[in-house]
Image: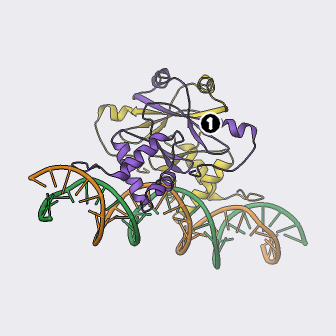
Chain colours: A yellow, B purple, C orange, D green
Amino acid sequence: MPAATMKYSRQREAVREFLMSRKDHPTAETVYKNLREKFPHISLGTVYRNLALLVELGEAVKLPGIGGFDRFDGNTAPHYHFICENCGAVMDLDMPQLPYINDAAEKNFDGTITGHLAFFYGKCSKCKTTAEHAHSDTGT
Amino acid sequence: MPAATMKYSRQREAVREFLMSRKDHPTAETVYKNLREKFPHISLGTVYRNLALLVELGEAVKLPGIGGFDRFDGNTAPHYHFICENCGAVMDLDMPQLPYINDAAEKNFDGTITGHLAFFYGKCSKCKTTAEHAHSDTGT
DNA sequence: TTGTATATTAGTAATGATTACTAATATATT
DNA sequence: AATATATTAGTAATCATTACTAATATACAA
């Protein structure tokens, strides 16, 4: 619930800027670790609150529960995601929207389809060649 | 981690049967509530352990983090899901697989796409007419 | 500039789904 | 029946996320 009137905050701006600058859909923990370089006393709660606020304002998107925890995407334009089965990396896919699959879904369905969310699985370019097993998102 | 050799258990059979009998992708809590009618002393841990075991054996599928918690699907054949934005209900969609969208995803992608998961959103037939706000999965 | 109002924060405690642990029980085999 | 071990019930621990609170930052006006 955004406050009645909103005030500027350096922490919120930093969260916003960090999110916009990244294409890897960081977790709250990753945002926290990175912002601590600029704000050594920032609290995890502040990160969570501002991430939720940005989502409410339509300036970020929440990808819930991927690999056990929520991730946040500064790109609010509808797009598809890829998740590497090997290293857990999450990345955007450069592909057009597929609005017609909504029609396919609505064909034998009583309700109304307004949209969809799709995640593609496989191996990222790195894991395709190297057969490593470590999981990423180290926040570097 | 399944044990070296597996033994029969009435509780596990009950979990399996319950899951197979339902098309609404119940949560662990829902399975627990229902099985308590037959096993008044069954523990939630037993339900979780057996659900995880069934997933490992390939007899069930886990839908992670939908609406805040994991759901379990006794239908292991690949299929698509619908999630009602109003009541939170989760249901199967009667539609063909869309293998060609993997090709669309792989077009400008360096890695390998092996599959996808898609969730469709909108209003179920019930919520399309009645404008209620309660969330379901009451376990009845 | 001061002063007042209130949104925001840091720090910490609480929540809640899920997982781990352990002594007792169920199952399988001899 | 006796032995071995997989499984359970019950409970405690985990851990991402949320809620709470006194102190601080921001906005704006006198």
Q: Residues within 10 Å of mark 1 (few under 14, many from 20)?
A: many
User: Disc count in the image?
Assistant: 1
Q: Secondary structure at mark 1?
A: strand
Give coordinates of residue A44: x percent, y percent: 53, 61
Q: Residue at x 45, y 50 (%)?
A: A68
Most foreground residue, A22 or A104: A104
Give coordinates of residue A99: x percent, y percent: 62, 25
Give coordinates of residue A63: x percent, y percent: 54, 44
Q: Could one spot residue B86 in this view of the protein?
A: yes
Q: Residue at x 30, y 31 (%)?
A: A129
Return the chain for callout 1: B
Q: Residue at x 40, y 28 (%)?
A: B114
Q: Which residue is under mark 1?
A: B121
Q: Could one spot residue B62 in this view of the protein?
A: no
Is B24 positioned to the left or the right of B125 in the image?
A: left
Q: Amino acid at mark 1?
A: Tyr
Give coordinates of residue B140: x percent, y percent: 58, 50
Quarter of the figure with residue B42: bottom left
Most foreground residue, A25 or B12: B12
Most foreground residue, B18 or A110: B18
Q: Residue at x 62, y 49 (%)?
A: B136
Decide: is B7 above or below A38: above
